Image (cartoon, rainbow, N blue to C red):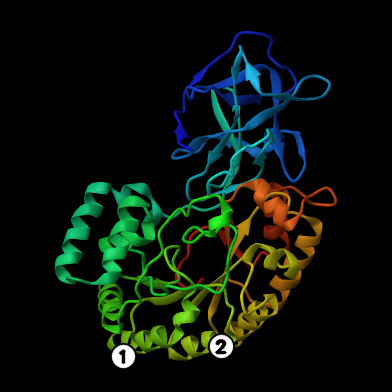
Amino acid sequence: MSALAATRARPSGRRPARTHLRTVFARPDGTVLDHPELEAAADMGVSARANVADFIPLPKGSLLLALPGRSVVGYDTASQREVSCYDGAEVCAVAAALPLGFTRLALPAYVERPAAPVLPLYGYTAVAWGKDGFFAAAARTDELESWSAKLHHPDQVSEAIALRSLEFPGNSILQQLSRCAHEYACFTAQNTFLRQGEAAIPVSVACNARCIGCISEQDPEAQVKSAQERIRRRPSLDEICEIAIAHLQTVPGGMVSFGQGCEGEPLLASPLIEQAIRRIRAATSAGTIHCNTNASDASALGRLLDAGLQSVRVSLNSARPHIYEAYYRPRGYGFADVKESLALAARKGAAISLNLLTHPGVTDDPAEIAAFAELLTAVPVAMVQTRTLNVDPAVYFAAVGRPRERTLGMRQWLAWLHHDFPGVGVGNFTRGFG
């Protein structure tokens, strides 16, 4: 599935008067049109008329995506309508994929037609046509200069890759990150070469979870390709340390992080990472050593913290064990182990952030809110980093179930989080200690 051009041809006809948002759909040639008679719909676990308050002008850097085999859903004056053809041609629903710094508030509303293919790993966001442009169901939740596109210009990245490759010839980490920087446009990988902000140090080739939305290793039966290729060879201690020490000594307030999207679970490589942390800290006290982890092994995490790990970001989609395990499909651990790791990190004084994989209809479910509140009360979390979960919504709902009661709504969920936990930061980027 390729991105659509952000162009529009307006069909003639009557305009709905009850809202400023209109349904959009894609024609076979990729043209995106607004429907002349239908108000936009959105899916928040249940399809409903789009709430104008949930939509903002389509952020710069967004992609419009056609959803093949899926009929668009909209509303006329009285009821919901499904549209599979327009002007004699088959059409399909449209979604937006948001750039960094935004959190999705609603899913695209559509009806799957027979034999519809599984959607690739994108964060599908409801999109509509409003006054003079496209609108997306999203909220701006973070902004950080070091994560701006202007600091990651392709020419600068290419030059930096060449420089680091000369500085550390044959380093297998840089060979992996060069691909991540070019093909996947990963800012964390690019930062390693550019010597700025948070730098990626991928280490682990294996994982003890089989996440439904894993971007680096999908099951063959999943019918969807991995978005990235995982690192295939564990790097040496020397390869890790030479990159990490140079970054921390050079970048004011810099950070090196283990546990990237192009690797497995770093705790499975904890003996090597522990050695690396001790050697790094013997060479320099500058900057922050951070780890992104599923927190599956408290004893392994404890050893890393004792070695000098300062910041931990724990990935989860839910604070409810059955929802968590339905998505992560853990091998040899469970949600109780995650909670044990969080408690241990708190006792050892680590900065803790949560990499929360958000999904309308799940994150804002009242039962989920209650469980998440309990978790935030028990653990001193510095920041909740909201991440739009990249997965086919139908696949995710098939695994975890749709809500049994009306959800709060993601915009209201964000407001709840700010109000009830004012000491917890909410954003999208890792900063220093959390």
> Which label belongs to residue 282?
1
- Residue at 60% over, 43% down: 138
Q: Percent position (x, y) of residue 94?
A: 58, 32
Secondary structure beneath label 1: helix
**Position of residue 345 in the picture relative to residue 430 (left or right):** right
Asked whether 232 or 403 is in front, the reply is 232
Q: Percent position (x, y) of residue 125?
A: 60, 41
Q: Percent position (x, y) of residue 69?
A: 61, 33
Q: Quadrant of residue 17?
A: top right
> Which label belongs to residue 348?
2
Query: Residue 420, relative to residue 51: is it above or below?
Result: below
Query: Residue 48, relative to residue 380: is it above or below?
Result: above
Q: Is residue 363 visible?
A: no
Q: Percent position (x, y) of residue 158?
A: 22, 53
Secondary structure beneath label 2: loop
**Position of residue 307 in the picture relative to residue 348 (left or right):** left
Query: How busy is the neighbourhood of tag 2: few (under 14 within 10 Å), some, or many (20 plus)?
Result: few
Query: Residue 417, relative to residue 167: is it above or below?
Result: above
Asked whether 351 or 325 is in front, the reply is 325
Query: Residue 73, relative to residue 353: is it above or below?
Result: above
**Position of residue 125 in the picture relative to residue 253 (left or right):** right
Query: How busy is the neighbourhood of tag 1: few (under 14 within 10 Å), some, or many (20 plus)?
Result: few
Q: What is the three-letter code of the residue carrying label 2? A: Lys
Residue at the far top in the pictured view: 13
In terms of sequence position, does the residue under pointer 2 or pointer 1 come before the other?
Answer: 1
Asked whether 141 or 328 is in front, the reply is 328
Q: Is residue 235 visible?
A: yes
Q: Quadrant of residue 384?
A: bottom right
> Between marks 2 and 1, how big is the CA–CA gap?
20 Å
- Residue at 66% over, 83% down: 340
> Which label belongs to residue 92?
none
Asked whether 90 or 47 is in front, the reply is 90
